Image (cartoon, coloured by chain):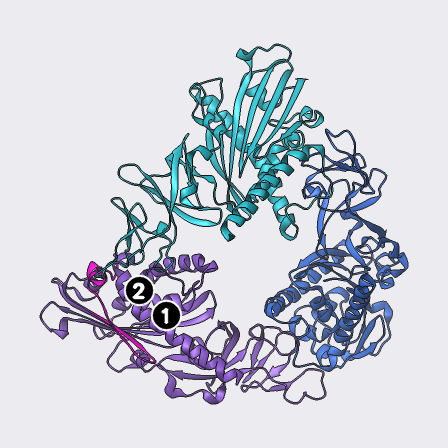
Chain colours: A cyan, B purple, C blue
Amino acid sequence: MFLRNQWYIAAWTHEIGRALLKRRIAGEPIVFYRTEAGRAVAFEDRCPHRHAPLSMGIIVGDKLECGYHGIQFDPDGICVHIPGAESIPKGACVRSYKLIEKWGWAWIWLGDAERADEDLLPQDFRWAAEPGWQNLGDTLNVKAHYQLLVDNLLDLSHEAFLHTKTIGNRAVADVPCKTSLHRDHVRVTRVMYNCAPPPLFVKARGFTTNIDRHQDITFAPPCYVHIDVKAIPAGTNDLSNALQWHVLNALTPETEGSTHYFWALPRFFSQGDPEMDKMLHGAIIKTFNEDFEMLEAQQELLKDRSLDHRTIATAADAGPTRARGIVQRLMREEEAATTH
Amino acid sequence: MFLRNQWYIAAWTHEIGRALLKRRIAGEPIVFYRTEAGRAVAFEDRCPHRHAPLSMGIIVGDKLECGYHGIQFDPDGICVHIPGAESIPKGACVRSYKLIEKWGWAWIWLGDAERADEDLLPQDFRWAAEPGWQNLGDTLNVKAHYQLLVDNLLDLSHEAFLHTKTIGNRAVADVPCKTSLHRDHVRVTRVMYNCAPPPLFVKARGFTTNIDRHQDITFAPPCYVHIDVKAIPAGTNDLSNALQWHVLNALTPETEGSTHYFWALPRFFSQGDPEMDKMLHGAIIKTFNEDFEMLEAQQELLKDRSLDHRTIATAADAGPTRARGIVQRLMREEEAATTH
Amino acid sequence: MFLRNQWYIAAWTHEIGRALLKRRIAGEPIVFYRTEAGRAVAFEDRCPHRHAPLSMGIIVGDKLECGYHGIQFDPDGICVHIPGAESIPKGACVRSYKLIEKWGWAWIWLGDAERADEDLLPQDFRWAAEPGWQNLGDTLNVKAHYQLLVDNLLDLSHEAFLHTKTIGNRAVADVPCKTSLHRDHVRVTRVMYNCAPPPLFVKARGFTTNIDRHQDITFAPPCYVHIDVKAIPAGTNDLSNALQWHVLNALTPETEGSTHYFWALPRFFSQGDPEMDKMLHGAIIKTFNEDFEMLEAQQELLKDRSLDHRTIATAADAGPTRARGIVQRLMREEEAATTH
């Protein structure tokens, strides 16, 4: 069960083109393509005739033709051709989804199209397209429920144990975080003064002294975690030698047990430096793989438990717990709206 | 759930010999062998003592000996020896199935043995042993429900899209078929006058002109589709240069998600030509593999849907729909006969 | 469902050390390690904070530290450190299991700790540490329910069919066994006078004549089978040239469909002979692999049947049937003790 009246990142805009893209989003099989004029289109990846995946078909001009019996759909999903048939049944169509492109991503709305409102996009994700910031990003897939990823990102104390070789230092675990709980978002902040810079920070910015390290994390439902990161030579306020980046994490559910992980890392230093891009891309993938090993092990152990079962809760759990609470409240609201 | 009071092809006769053959038919594990005198025998592949698969045993004369504790069964399934036991419990036996051999195949009856009647065999399958016709055939396995294969064969318009490199041409999709619906069978015919011959037809018969192409398809329950094919140089009626063959398709269910595909292709031309055999065998396998990719994708998408769910039905669906209707009626009749 | 108030072999003592050992016992994920002072410890392999497997953590002195958020547990399972937290919630702990080491193995008690009594260990397993007997042993894993392995070992008539190349001869099947049924154990004996020695016996002891072969098998719940084996040159009583060994089989359930097979083979001949060790180890593994192929095929066929379903029962089934009966009675007793 996933929230439906929400925007989910479905793809990077450059992933949708004149070849069919097949991807499952929140349990639903979906096929994506782009019209000759450049409009991005999303259909249920299932021909309404005989359940053939439309992603096994071909693009004919602006239309998608099913690879099994040649039925064609226009970019609105309307059936416009059935080979050998004299007429087309009224209302014949494939389910199409509302899709908008913004900040480098294609966002899909799975629920009621009339409620799809661009203003509901998570505004923090504008950083991926902010002038003066150099972006970097990729798509990963994790065999774990997306809420386990939200938990992971809202409690960064794990960096001290899981990521010692990249972004972790003991300070992240030892300095308590501050959590502020809001009706529709959660914010977790931690400032670590005069701590040793983690290995990746040294590589990226050449720190030779201790740093003041700032983490400012915001969760927005259903699956968005924005981390505003600053590291400044300790006690200096010298932003010109600082590390400043945003980690944008869009944790689009694929199934109940897997997640598409769209991440972006817009940075304020080393603009137009492909060597830096390459180094950071590799380091981020390495770090996430450390997370994924743990997340997939959790998912495996949670097979016969509730996702919310826990017998030890720490102070750092306040953020993740509220994030789940928000999603649960929205689920109840959606359910109520559907049944009444 | 499968029909039980029906003949299913279980094997080619040459597959059953003095080595044990293990095969699941309509969900049931079955073991086959042949007695010294040549009688083909089918037992449940499960020793009634401790669930050892009898297919892991050995043939001792006419008896099958379980490989675990050495219990022996005669060709009627009667237990005739238990090592170390002084006597054999009365009635001890393994379930045996009625099996007849006809037209090159072994046919099994899973239901009430007293209702097994040779006259109920699908008579169209006699073509596999018709004098003057050169047969060819094989066994394949598809990870899809057998009714998806029936659908496929009763609506050949898909040839124009899925089989463009072998047997497809646009005419198959553009010329509407004629369907005649009967209580216990379905017939779908299509005649395409003056159309381009598909690649395989050219290879087989060297057509240099357009052809008149005839397809005459008959479904008989539970899983038999016979296609009578003729292709004649357009407007000539010249049968001596025609392509004439029958495609016999026996779609024996293996499980709810897989099918044994016994196919035969008796032809009227190029008798005794091993090169033609080889070419046709290769081309048929290639064609079926194109189908299987689609069928297995359908099966995957149907995991959480009813097999009969559909929101677009075309004129060409009349045949497949009635075929399913016949099977459903027979299922209800079997169920009623069992419960009353 | 497994008995819980029972000792199960969890590991060889040498398997538990200063590296974390992860093993599922009777369905429960468990992690094992040894303190600096040498005490063997067993915890549920699941951090009570967020379901991270503790086996992905590290040992810090005598404590186990979770690899995700660094929470630490002492050897009694008490939570003693939560990074970044000012205090530890009262009662915070991971489930720990009673573990004792005896005769070379670590035995785990899954149920009520206060009922764990060392006197309940299967006393026959003392042979693994008996002075004057040379032990040999290993751990295997079989994809079959442990009761299928008990069945196998209590009815050795199968040796005549499954193990013809190692320990089988026809006599095992032809000579009836004697079974004596007790409230809490089962004994099956068979003496085969003047029979041909099986291949492995000849290899081990160089028999050149027929032998008198004795098998004395005892089952103790939940999963212990002890086989006392003697083979003496026929009619001689010459124990100095005899083969004497004990086969100790501990069939610890891993899941409903798999079993850890801890076996030991203490022998009375060829002490301190590494060539004999090597030969016997290889032969035993080979023999067990013959069993496993059959056991895993049974398990597969039993997917949709009750484990107790059977339509032929032989005289040799009296032992296995009673063994299951004892386990069932104990299950009922445990259930009654839990619910009342």
Distance from disc 2 to disc 1, alpha carbons, whole Å, reads: 10 Å
Instruction: Give left or right: position of A323 versus C7.
Output: left
Question: Is residue A1 something one can see in this rendering?
Answer: no
The x, y position of residue C299, in whole percent, is 63, 66
Highlighted range, magenta:
B166-190
In the rendered view, tell whether residue C264 sits above or below residue A28: below
Residue annotated with mark 2: B284
- Residue holding disc 1: B138
Amino acid on which disc 2 is placed:
Ile
Kindly give the residue lying farthest to the left in the view shown: B236
Indicate the position of residue B284 as horizontal and vertical percent values. Answer: 31, 64
The spot of residue B188 in percent (x, y) is 26, 72
Left or right for C269, reference A127: right
Is residue B172 a member of the stretch shown in magenta? yes
Marks 2 and 1 close (CB-CB < 8 Å): yes
Which residue, as the protein is rendered here, is positioned at the far front?
A: A340
- Return the chain for callout 2: B
Q: Is residue A159 left or right of residue A241?
A: right
* Viewer-proximal residue among C249 and B232: B232
Residue depicted at x 65% and y 69%? C165
Where is residue B145? Give x, y as percent: 43, 66
Tell me which corner region of the image, top left, top right, bottom left or bottom right, holds residue A207. Answer: top right
Residue A260 lies in the magenta-colored region:
no
Q: Secondary structure at mark 1?
A: strand
Residue plotted at (41% across, 68% down)? B146
The amino acid beneath tag 1 is Asp
Question: Which corner quadrant of the image does residue B84 belong to?
Answer: bottom right
Residue at 57%, 23% (x, y): give it: A229
- When the figure is inspected, residue B144 is found, relative to residue C41, above or below; the finding is below
Question: Within 10 Å of the Cα at label 1, are there few (<14), some (14-19), or many (20+) other Cα atoms?
Answer: some
Disc 1: host chain: B
